[in-house]
Structures are given as C-alpha cells and as structure tokens.
Image (tube, rainbow, N blue to C red):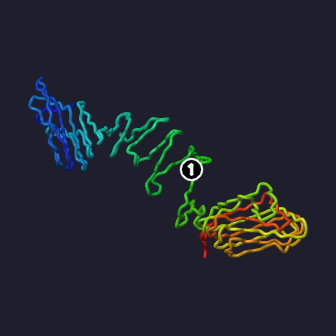
Amino acid sequence: MLLLTSTSDLVTITTGSAGTVLVHTSWVDNASGTITPGRTDTPSITTATTTTIVAAPAASTQRNVKKISVFNSSATVSNLITITHTDGTNPITLFSATLAPSESVEMADSGNFQYFDATGKPYQTTVSGGAGAFTTLTASSTVTLSPASANVTISPTGTGTVTISPASTVAISPTGALTINPTAASTLNNLSVGATTPSTGRFTFLGAGVASSTSSYVTAAAGTATVAPMVVTGGTNLTTAAAGAFENDAICPYFTTNTTDGRAIISAIQQFRLTANGTAISTVNNFFGTTSNISLVSGAYYEIDIEMYFTWTYSTGTGILTWNFTNSAAPTSMNIHGEWTPVGGINSTTGASNLCVDIVNSTSAAQTLTTGAMTTTNTQYARFRIFLHNGTGTSLKIQVTPITGSTVTPLAGSRWTSRRIPTGNTGTFAT
C-alpha cells in the first residue's frame, strides 16, 4: 500500500522529455471509518514538468493509494519518468526509469512497481538479496543483476535451452573476470571474446571440439572424414612478416620463425607412388597408370620431381626409349633436367655418356627426351626435375614410348612429387 496521511502528502510524477504520458490513479479514503473510493485520470502530460497525480487527502483522512498506471503513448519519444512521494518537506523517489514508446509502469495494491515493455510483458529489472527464477528475461535496454558480488546462475542444465533475447548481439560486460564454465555436453556458439584491439579478451585454455588441456593453450579435436581439426582460410599475407605467424595466401602455407630469416614456405607436396610393379608398357602410355596425371592451376608455378625404376625388355638388336611430358595446354615456360642410368642398366658402365639432357624455357605443350640405344634386358633408373610456369593447362602427363618390340615394366617405389611455389621470392634477403 501507499499511504497519504496528512494534508501535505502528495504523489507526483516528473517527466524528463516533451512527449505524451498518460497517468491513472485509484485510491480509497478512510475518514474515521467512513470509506470513500476515488480516482484521477490526469490530463495528458506533454512537457518536461512535475505533475501531481494523487492530491493530498482532507484533514483527519487517510488516503490509501491502490493503483498508479503510467503509459508512454508517444510513438517516438523515450521519457524518463520519476514517481515521488512527499510529506511536504521530504520528497522520496518511489520509482524512476526511462519508458520507451508504448512502455508502461504500474503500482499495484501491494505497493510494488512493475515495468512493462511495449508488448505488455513485464521487465525484471533487479534481483537482489536472494535467488530469482524467470522463464524469460527480455529487455531492450540495460538489465542489471545485483548485488555485484553475488553468483548468477543461468539454468537449466543438461538438455535444456537458455535464450537471451533479443536475438542480435548480447554483451556480457563485468568489470572483472567473467567465467563461462559449461558442462562437457554444452556448446558455445557465435561467441566473440574481446573488442577490436588485441588482448582485450582471451581464454586461458581453449578446447576446439574437445576438452581443453593444461599442457596446451589450444587443443583441437582429431579430424574426421567430414571435419578437419583446423582450417586456415587463404587470404592476404602480412605486409611485414611477424615472428610466429602462420599464413596462407591460397598459393602456399607459410611460417615465420623470426624476422631476420623472414617468412618461409611450408612444403605442401602432392605425391603419387607405385606400391607394386606396374603392367608392361609396349606402346605410348602413362608410366604411373591411367589416373596419375599431375593437376595444375592456371598461371601457377611448380617444382616437380619424378623418379622412375623400370625393367627394360627387348628381344633382338638395340632400342631406345622416349620420355613424353605433355601439358594439356602450352606452358608459359618449362625447364626440364633429365638423368638416367647408362644404357647397360643400373651399376653398368655401358653407354656411360648417355646420362643427362636438359630443356630450357620451353613453351611447347609436348616435350620428348630420348635415351641412348639399349641392347640387353636390364633394370633402369630415370629422374626428371621440372620447373614449370604453367599457362592455362590443367594437367601434366608422364608417359613413356618404347621402341617397337620392346616393353617397359614400371617398378614399385617409382614416384613423383609436385610442389606449388609462390610467384615471387619468399624470405628476407641481405645486400
């Protein structure tokens, strides 16, 4: 209840802005046992002013205020309203809040004030002196939980759901440390820690997809067939390399150990290897099998290393092998260095002069290199190192053409590796 017990007692409302505020009050007068009800609908308050909304009772009369209703009917103006009780000397604030358009506040017969949003839902503005349980906590302005030293628990646990509305950004901003400690089954989605400057927010130990570990500041879960432990999205490298930085420019991954050495390329190599001997080749064919071509990106640079072990079989006379390197489109430039065992085979000195061949700055899509004349069945080794500035080609074939009547059988352990490299130099260089 709210009592006015003297002819000096009043209830007033102060509006902080020029808007439109509507006020209704109801009360009951008790004059020596004679009960008389009363009410006042205050004319619309449209200025920033102080207005009496419950007048003083007559002499020897007690006025018990049963209800006060204040509604901000403005469509655009938020208004700070303050409801005050005075005995003529001491004004006491009973309630103060900024009402947004269509928001309201009511005092019921209990004497407690309740604040309502524009949809008629009550706000819970303060929890103090003990626990409070709420189904929905919704606010368009600041919600204060007090006392500041109290523990605040948001439940339920387990499979329940806690929703903080509105659905846009929700800021939790204590002046000290904030601990979010979910159970092992809980998840934190779309969580942003800190502001736009470094070191304003952090996790001491972070587990991504797995529980955190005290032996590592960041622990990532093991990868699966559909989820990688970590993805570093390709973008733009730092203008100035920073020590300890991992980077990915969508061409190569990089790591900078220190700024003296500068940024370094992390080797990302594609490899194809024969785990068993291949089928004998008698006409032009892929040495490593049907699906073994090297995939290429348009305009990219590559370092390619090819090592081939094979058995050469020829029935009569002498024969040669032709190695074919065929790009699906003409390259911008390609250098090839080839070397192989003597024509007599591994550990032989026969034909020792036929060991190396080079092609420099070629722009032809098809390159061929030919061995010397071989006369006996033997085991051979050949290696080719290629520096390729690709044009619009999409793949590079590695093929061999035996002379008629001969065969080449690829042997296990033969392999090629391909490594894409940056378009320019990488690192810090001295004068």
Residue 431: percent from left, percent from top: 60, 76
**Height in image: 191 above or below 251?**
above
Q: Farthest right residue?
A: 316
Which amino acid type is shown beneath numbered disc 1?
A: Val
Q: Quadrant of the N terminus?
A: top left
Residue appearing at x 66%, y 73% in the figure: 333
Q: Is residue 25 visible?
A: yes
Q: Is residue 173 visible?
A: no
In front of the other: 378 or 402: 402
Place residue 38 in its image quadrant: top left
In front of the other: 407 or 201: 407
Task: Judge from the rendering whether residue 262 lies leftward or rightward of residue 350; answer left or right.
Answer: left
Q: Helix or strand or loop: what does disc 1 sit on?
A: strand
Task: Judge from the rendering whether residue 411 lies leftward or rightward of residue 67; answer left or right.
Answer: right
Task: Judge from the rendering whether residue 349 lies leftward or rightward of residue 428; answer left or right.
Answer: right
Residue position for label 1? 218
**Height in image: 1 above or below 283?**
above
Place residue 65 in its image quadrant: top left
Task: Judge from the rendering whether residue 18 lies leftward or rightward of residue 200; answer left or right.
Answer: left
In front of the other: 358 or 41: 358
**Height in image: 250 above or below 429?**
above
Residue appearing at x 47%, y 43% in the figure: 180
